[in-house]
Amino acid sequence: MGMRIAIYCLLMTLLPMLASLGARWHWTLELVTHFPLQYAIGLAIALLLGVCLRRRWIILLASVGLILCGWQLAPLYIPATPATAHGSSLRFLLANVHTANANHQRLLDLIEHGRPDVIVLLETNGAWIEALSSLNDTYPYRELQPRGDNFGMAVYSRVPMKEVKVIELAGSTVPTISAQAEIGEDIITFISTHPLPPVSSQYAKTRDRQLVALAELVSRTTGPVVVLGDLNTTSWSPRFADLLRDANLRDSRQGFGLHGT
């Protein structure tokens, strides 16, 4: 029984890990790149069973797999090099509220507790905009793009905003909002976006084009830039790695470890 469980754990972890090597060539293979933690748990079980059963080949395969998972997970726990201080700071809150969610008060409580300078909300429809009208006095600068589908967007800011643009990156038909926030003499550009989910070949291609266009937009922007959004990817997708590299961005998870979202 222990041998069967060990073999099952190896197959269910090592096979998708091998398949993930083709993530750049087919969207379905990218889907298996997102689970290094789950793979590590399965491999740890296989390793423990291999030790108990004294099967060297199980120990070897599980150990190699665990090293690869650790190589993927470790960077998130290594503190990032602090950015150069400019004398000003800006506190953002990003939330995908989910269009059908009617628990508006929970978000209002979160905003009251965190007191962010800028709020970026995704999947906002008319009901959400109406429910959040109490924010209008505290956040007088706004760009609201409610939609009936899951790609509405809203930005609320305490600080003045300028150069506010609503654009559709790479013909994606979903909004991206680019704006500049003024803090004293400093200007910080922030870009909020929400690509389509990669649930089909066409959606995956559209998302990939949007991420490429996003990197190009960031590269053309001078000064500090913050990108916020539900990118419909994870830290381990090669598409996300391309975005970080091409736009010279830093994964905001770095130094904070794994979180649910």
Image: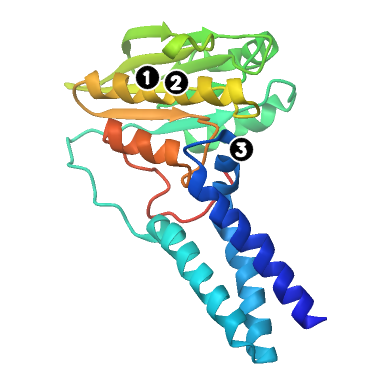
Q: Nearer the viewer, residue 109 or 61?
A: 61
Q: Secondary structure at mark 2?
A: helix
- Quarter holding residue 12: bottom right
Amino acid on which the number 1 mark rests in the picture:
Ala
Disc with the residue nearer the chain's start (3 vs 1): 3
User: Residue 215: image x %, image y %?
Assistant: 33, 26
Marker disc for residue 210:
2
Marker disc for residue 28:
3
Q: Disc 3 and disc 1: Cα gap in Å? A: 22 Å
Residue at the spot 74% in from the left edge and 22% down from the top edge: 100
User: Residue 53: image x %, image y %?
Assistant: 70, 90
Marker disc for residue 38:
none
| Looking at the image, residue 169 lies above or below residue 23 | above
Observer-side mark, 3 or 1, equals 3
Q: Disc 2 and disc 3: Cα gap in Å? A: 18 Å
- Is residue 138 at all visible to an observer of this figure? no
- Left or right of 216 in this view: 257: right
Question: Is there CB contact under 8 Å for labels 1 and 2?
Answer: yes
User: Residue 111: image x %, image y %?
Assistant: 54, 31
List the residue tagged with mark 1: 213
Q: Secondary structure at mark 1?
A: helix
- Left or right of 104 in this view: 159: left
